[in-house]
Amino acid sequence: MEFSILAQVLALTVTVFTLLGVVSAIEAVMKTRTAQGAVAWVIVLLTFPYIAVPVYWIFGRTKFDGYVEQRKAVEEALKTTQQATSDAIWPNSVDTDDLCNTFRTLLPLARTAVTVGNDVRLLVNGEATHTALLNAIHGAQQHIYLVYYIIRDDHIGAELMNALIVKAQQGLSVHVIYDEIGSRTFARSSLLSRALSHGVNIVPFNTTRGRRNRFQLNFRNHRKLACIDSRLALLGGHNVGREYLGQDPKIGPWRDTHLQIQGPAVLAMELTFAADWRWAKGEQLQLSFTKPSESRHGKQVLIFPSDPSSEFEEAGLMYHQLISEAKQRLWITSPYFIPDHSIISALQLAVLRGVDVRVMIPDNPDGPMVAMANWSYTKELLPAGVKVFRYGPGFMHQKVTLVDNDLCAIGTANFDNRSFKLAFEITALINDEEFALEVQKMLQADFASASEVSAQHLSHRPFWFRPAMALARLFSPVL
């Protein structure tokens, strides 16, 4: 009798998971944005439904159902704030006719103006970034807005929280957003409790609202942004934690790039923070900025936020535009280089135009599947003439693109499916020859510390290497 009941339960379980696998596969075909991603999900959902079904509903969906509606509500609620921001930026904005082609093309997606009168400073590696962040907080007089994908419960996180507590106790408006998945240890820490009890406004960014999103772990807020008094902001690759200063012995040296921006572009970044706060907290953040000086000098900057609720794949389109605009030079650095076919084709066309195309990735990527995917795309790029470099001294995490002698993009977006379609990102695009020269020198030093990949590197791999690359390539849309 017991055996019969067990057999019935097992049969029912198999039937239920098989049906769920079929239903999930149908949804994947209908909603996955790329054919490659749809094929990958259909195969695993029908072959291994017991594992794949829960994984799909947690990680696989690419439509942010809750935020699509929320974004409309946020944009409506922020109309007054957005108009006030536009009015403040207007004296430093650039007429459309005077913009470079890339800025003119991306402007409708950015939903903010291109500004001049900005001072932009490169922050190379963690010590420079952490010091600049603490100095900015110490000098704050009105408000502090921070959003980070990762805040660690360690001594670096403690230094940040202590600095924020001091400012909150002085009566400043201090608001912090952390991603609930990226900062999951911080979310359970006494560090967070102490900061909250001392007047720091801290909220998690989550994407589990609504019945359909209850188990959803995609759609992370991957931004790393700090805005101080509407006058200064920092953004780039650095999160908050000891590893970003190269202090984690398991990881070793950490290569990253951040920006410090002073000028009217900061107002556009504060507007991005206000939208994130509206989603995370459900309340309107009253921005209290002062108008910047009406200087026509300084660097030309476009702040480009992107998120999965848009009808466009904004980060992917941004990179497409940068690639298509290149005439002499296109240097790309990304820790996660897992592009789709259209990006690969655009890079190949750039080489055919005579562009010096270089891609730099870490020699020790974040996980074996990412490593195999990187090798797979390297194999496809080398015959076209793209130069691929692997950075060896530690882990390279910077997201920097240099186009010709005057255009740079530095921010949080990687060259992968997650940044293109699933994550909340922010990038600063700078059109300035002097600054581009600084970035060029920085990247030249990185290339000198990296090794160029040749066809021989791939031909001398063990027999299992090619099947592993093919498998990683198949699943690259969901990495």
Image (cartoon, helix red, strand yellow):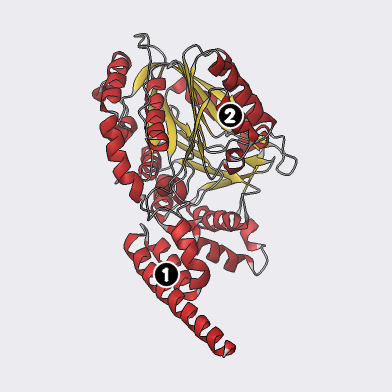
Q: In this view, does 316 lie to the left or right of 144?
A: left
Decide if residue 240 is on the left or right side of residue 53: right
In the image, what residue type sits under mark 2?
Answer: Met
Residue 70 showing in the rendered view: yes
Is residue 449 rendered to the left or right of residue 424? right
Q: Nearer the viewer, residue 171 or 19?
A: 171
Can you name the residue that lies furthest to the right here?
Answer: 249
Q: Distance between the residues labelled 2 and 1?
A: 44 Å
Crowd rating for badge 1 (residues with CA inside 10 Å; few <14, some 14–19, many 20+): many
- Residue in front for this viewpoint, 125 or 220: 220
Q: Looking at the picture, does residue 2 appear above or below residue 99?
A: below
Question: Which residue is tagged 1?
Answer: 42
- The image position of residue 469, as x and y in percent, is 57, 63
Residue at the image position 58 percent from the left and 88 percent from the top: 3
Label 1: state its secondary structure.
helix
Residue 441 visible in the shown view? no
Quadrant of the rendered image containing residue 67:
top left
Image point 58% across, 29% down: which residue? 442
Q: In which quarter of the image is residue 272?
A: top left
**Depicted 327 relative to depicted 14: above or below:** above
Q: Position of residue 85 (x, y in %)?
A: 31, 20
Residue 209 rendering spot, x and y as whole percentages: 40, 47
Q: Which of 280 and 341 is in front in this view?
A: 280
Q: What's the residue type where badge 1 is placed?
A: Val
Mark 2 or mark 1: name the one nearer the start of the chain.
1
Q: In this view, does 473 lie above or below 317?
A: below
